[in-house]
Amino acid sequence: MIATQLPALQIIIPLFAAPIIVLVRRSELAWIIAVVANLMCVLVAWKLLGLVNEQGIIRYSLGGWAAPTGIEYYVDSVNAPLLLLVAAISAIVLLYAYHSVKKSVDSNKHYLFYAAWMLCLSGLLGMLITGDAFNVFVFLEISSLSTYMLIAFGSDRRALTASFRYLVLGSIGASFILIGIGFLYAATGSLNMLDLAQRIPDASSERAILVAFSFISIGLMIKSAIFPLHAWLANAYHHAPITVTAFLAGTATKVSLYVFLRFLFSVFGTQYNFEYLLFNVILLPAAVLGFLIMSVVAVFQTDLRRMLAYSSVAQIGYIVAGISLATQAGLTAGYVHIINHAMIKTALFMSVGCIIYRLGHAHRPSLDNLIQTMPLTCAAFIISGLSLIGVPLTVGFVSKFTLIGAAMEKGWWMMAALVLVSSVLAIIYIGRVADVMLFRKQRLPNPIPQGRNEAPLSMLVPMYGLIFMSLYLGVYGSKTLAVASEAATQLLGGFR
Amino acid sequence: MTWLIPPLIFFYGAFLCLFVGRTQRTFITLLAPVIALVSLLMLPMGNMAQVQFLGFELIFIRLDKLAFVFSLIFIIAAFLAAIYAWHVNDKIQQVSTLLYAGAALGGVLAGDLISLFLYWEITAVASVFLIWARRTPAAYATGMRYLLIQVGSGVLLLAGLLVHYNDTGSILFEHMGLVSTGTLLIFLAFGIKCAFPLMHNWLQDAYPAATVTGTVVLSSFTTKMAVYALARGYAGEEILIYIGAVMTLFPIFFAEIENDLRKVLAYSLNNQLGFMVVGVGIGTELALNGTAAHAFCHILYKSLLFMSVGAVLYRTGTSKASELGGLYKTMPITMVCCLVGAASISAFPLFSGFISKSLILDASAKNGYYLVWFALVVASAGVLSHSGIKIPYFTFFAHDSGKRPAEAPMHMRIAMIITASLCVIIGVFPSLLYQLLPYDVAYKPYTTSHVLAQMQLLCFALLAFVFLMIKGIHPPEVRGINLDSDWVYRKILPTTLSAWAASAMSVANTWRIGLQTQASEWIIGIRRLSSPGGLLAKGWGVNSMVFVVTLLLLLVLFLNLF
């Protein structure tokens, strides 16, 4: 009985947790409810993944209304792993968040914070699970609005401007998507993705489809922070509460990228040559310039959050580079990096969160000799940093290796070379931080209290949990690769 | 057994070191090589520890006689360095030393290119901490340069192996030869770590910048791993003979005029690598035996020289020739050990360098490379001059600097004495080493003509040095103004040599300055754009963001519709 309702539960659990949290109001209780709801989400996502592996695609008609008319949830090997990823990362960050949130957010607003978090989570999971184009827009709005709210919780007043800028840009992106969906509906008379995929090839007006395609692409490029539409991201990540940053870095952009993949490959289908045009003229240069320029920019940042934010844009560049190859190997590389980068970047932001928890800032030049006071946090940062660089035996290496392999397979030597160059840039920006943490004598007059001053265990344990998970998947990289390759096959094969 | 392979033993040690106190850490650094040695001796010949990774079959252990010699000497070197570093109380250095030694060992034992690449990268990342551990801004900058070059080599290797895999469908690390783009890229990757001419600067830049003990460790592994890789993949590639010959010659000039003795040793390291590369290039059984033997001996005597100069640095705080001298009075044991190292590197009969270098020299003569043979002989004379005489002479004798440091600490003396004894034992009983070599070759180093020829060469070189010292060459203390500069010893050489060197340096400098100004302008520009507040990094206003969005939308619409 429950097994058949799993797709609905995936969304309903966090969606209902939010109002309950608002009613409860007590901050500890709010946190506990959020954690429990989130863990249930993880469980559901785990079950769904198992089901998909066992019996293939799951189609679920919401409210019993059959597919083209009603809203349909559609789970296959592309979104099932991502459902688990997003739910798990949210759960880990939420477990970690308790102390950090207590310190950085007003205690009478905690319940709003966790309620917004639950809404954001249900929005993101909804975008992943739904098979209905308009429903994507709805969930996108749910997740976006709650994200603006979460960012505005930042202790700094600049958080408000950052949130506002993101709001404007995000709304533009969302309305572009809505316009695109409108055009699609006008041209085909359907909103169901599977149905759309079948109707688009013999739609009455090809122009309408092309316009729809353009608007949806640009809208999703904004939401996924693809260079040069990334400008909202740095401020948002910088000024949001660090737990929110850790959560968003691992999930929000990744989910938008998934929707992008879905529309590009499953809905519009690869037989259209306009996509190749988009790939080669827009996406590929955007990806390559993105990972090169943003890596350079990251080198010169002095605030760790900002540095990691620009590095995120660069890493999204890798993912898009893989996608723009539009081959089995390329999509595998892009997809595997969605998973791997989510783990790496979340862990990095979590370690920065520990630093901020103790020091109140993450200004690189004042982190001298931090290893003495916060050894575990520094170790976490450096291990995840090595993974970001792509040192062998880490997940970063699995991504880099498959991406370069895919580029070479297609004969794009230049891109392979540039990926390597950009990974060297990552060494510089991570190396600068590592050097300051490990080797500098304290220059500023005692900014760091002496003696051990490690972050609380409740922050360290979830962080190390994530790091060990990512190390495991780095050593056994074939596991994630198999998942990614399956997803790529599914994407290239279209809806079945 | 897979979990007890030698490289892993070092990694376990490094991991344990993270959690224990000082005494335990010191013992772990000593014990790890011993256990690794036992593990190595118990390994059967052939492939082991095969693992599936990303759809490839990795072979972590491929043991044959070539790999065995290199593994053995790496383990010995790690052990000696651990004794020498007994006093070090720095978790970062100890952990990175173990990681570094383990990775170098792993690289030598790797049976496929991907696991080789894996260890290649670990050596780069682990070893840079030995430089950064000096904890000065200069060491940071040097370390960063070193790291970039090392990782650059790794990047080339990765690119090369992928191309190679695309071409051949195989990732096995065996003889490849320079036949395709892929193998060329791999060749360049090896070349960087092997410090080929024009790719060598990282070595002289980084090794003297590391900590006292760090330099001893660094000098043993990276370059010899590269020599092994070349011997494995590119034996008999003729171009290596000429690359090697150039490598033996050009560092001599720089070594002669260099004032920092650790830098002199770094140059002479480069020169010694040249001999090994020539051996690889000739590629006959005799030559490859020579390369392996020379690597074995070289690691010992080069460690010994770095140890003795390091001990002096440890006691006096300087390794500049102009500030040292007369130390034999208070550091006699260090002096004797240094002399043994000097005699070995200069290939005096009865010392280890003699029995290994002869193999390579003979191989080059036997195969008709007379010009190369001559270059190697000239280089040998140069070695005698800058490493054999200059190092001990200006440290322990020459003008009295007035310094009266205490003798090196006990553990340093023990390490040096063991290393020195090994040099002598190998020199006196060469068959001990010869039986370890990859091929069975009956070779007698101690023939009358051979010993005589070598002694003649050495005596005349020695004589020339004494002659130059007495005749019109000013001892350093006269040139008091220049004491701190790096150019003091230019006059010690015949004027011609120094003129060559000077002009070479000035040409290099002009180029460098030109390039530097150009590059720095670029960097300033990039920095202006990318720093916080620069165009690329500041928080864009809503207007400009929307402008970009609109522009891109128009572009996409235009492309799609027309």
Image (spheres, coloured by chain):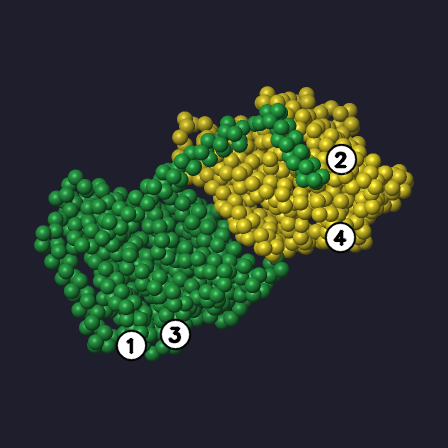
Q: CA distance from mark 1 to mark 4?
A: 70 Å
Quadrant where the C terminus of chain B lies? top right
**SS state under label 1:** loop
Decide: few, some or many residues near mark 3? Use Cα within 10 Å; few <14, some 14-19, many ≥20.
some
Q: Amino acid at mark 2?
A: Gly
Chain letter for the part of the structure drawn in green? B
Q: Using the rendered view, name the quadrant where residue A175 is placed.
A: top right
Q: Colour of chain A?
A: yellow
Which residue appears at 68% of the width and 37% of the height?
A: B558
Same-chain check, marks 2 and 4: yes
Which residue has dot 4 on it?
A493
Q: Is residue B369 visible?
A: yes
Decide: few, some or many residues near mark 4? Use Cα within 10 Å; few <14, some 14-19, many ≥20.
few
**Circle 3 chain:** B
Which residue appears at 54% of the width and 38% of the height?
A: A294
Q: Amino acid at mark 3?
A: Glu
Quadrant where the N terminus of chain B lies? bottom right
Please state the horizontal and vertical placement of residue A453, each as a whole percent of the image: 51, 33
Which residue has dot 3 on it?
B285
Q: Is residue B131 above or below residue A93?
A: below
Q: CA distance from mark 3 to mark 1?
A: 15 Å
Which residue appears at 19% of the width and 49% of the height?
A: B489
Which residue has dot 2 on it?
A180
For marks 3 and 1 on the same chain, the one whose residue lies earlier in the sequence = 3
Decide: few, some or many residues near mark 1? Use Cα within 10 Å; few <14, some 14-19, many ≥20.
few
Q: Which of the two marks, 2 or 1, is nearer to us in this view?
A: 2
For marks 2 and 4 on the same chain, the one whose residue lies earlier in the sequence = 2
Tell me, for residue B444, which label it has, or none: 1
